[in-house]
């Protein structure tokens, strides 16, 4: 099994982290001018760009939901990828964002905005300027290109690809 390098967490300048937030001491990079509100949890293997806002109660870097049925029972798969959040992103309250596998990180590109109660599963890759309103669920391995709008309470099934400027309701 591979051993992952453990790097001390780095936090940029002018970043405001609530005293009630948790940020792992290892393998987190947070850019400049980031705001992290109360009760946010940022686990290991997360990279956050500049000018990002993460609203209260969000959890970033969780294990993905990947389990395999075997003759010996259910085997839970460890996720060894990352969550990468690019610049100028806003994550709404109570979002859950899972880290990817080593071959496919979870990526949220520049200027993406999510509303409250959004779930972004392992290995999801979201292009620039996408809008994800309340309670939408993006399942594992989904690719969303640029300028996409995903409607409230929409569910996107695993490994779907959504093209530029699509409107999902």
Image: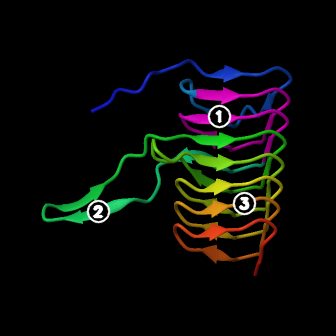
Which one is earlier in the sequence, the residue at label 2 or at label 3?
2
Comparing marks 2 and 3, which lies closer to the viewer? 3
Q: CA distance from mark 1 to mark 3?
A: 20 Å
Q: Is residue 67 left or right of residue 86?
A: left
Residue 49, image quadrant: top right
Disc 1 versus disc 3: nearer the observer? 3
User: Label 2, on which residue?
Assistant: 68
* Mark seen at residue 145: 3
- Spatial separation of the CA atoms under disc 2 and disc 3: 29 Å
For label 3, count other residues whose C-alpha is less than 10 Å away and answer few (under 14), some (14-19) or many (20+): some
Q: Which residue is mark 1?
A: 47
2, above or below 106, in the image: above
Which badge, 1 or 3, comes first in the chain's sequence? 1
Q: CA distance from mark 1 to mark 2?
A: 28 Å
Q: Mark 2 or mark 1, which is nearer the start of the sequence?
A: 1
Q: Using the image as rendered, state which of residue 74 and residue 167 is in the foreground.
A: 167
Query: Looking at the image, which residue is at 47% across and 21% down?
Result: 6
């Amino acid at each position: 099994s591979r051993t992952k390098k453990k790097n001390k967490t780095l936090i940029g300048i002018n970043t405001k982290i609530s005293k009630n937030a948790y940020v792992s001491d290892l393998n987190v990079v947070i850019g400049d001018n980031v705001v992290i509100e109360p009760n946010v949890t940022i686990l290991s293997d997360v990279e956050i760009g500049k000018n990002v806002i993460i609203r209260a109660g969000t959890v970033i870097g969780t294990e993905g939901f990947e389990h395999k049925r075997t003759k010996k029972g259910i085997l839970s798969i460890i996720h060894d990828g990352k969550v990468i959040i690019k610049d100028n992103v806003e994550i709404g309250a109570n979002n859950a964002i899972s880290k990817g596998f080593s071959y496919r990180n979870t990526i949220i590109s520049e200027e993406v905005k999510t509303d409250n109660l959004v779930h972004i599963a392992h290995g999801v890759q979201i292009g620039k300027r996408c809008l994800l309103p309340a309670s939408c669920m993006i399942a594992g391995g989904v690719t969303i290109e640029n300028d996409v709008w995903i409607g409230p309470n929409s569910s996107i099934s695993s490994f779907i690809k959504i093209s530029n400027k699509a409107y999902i309701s």
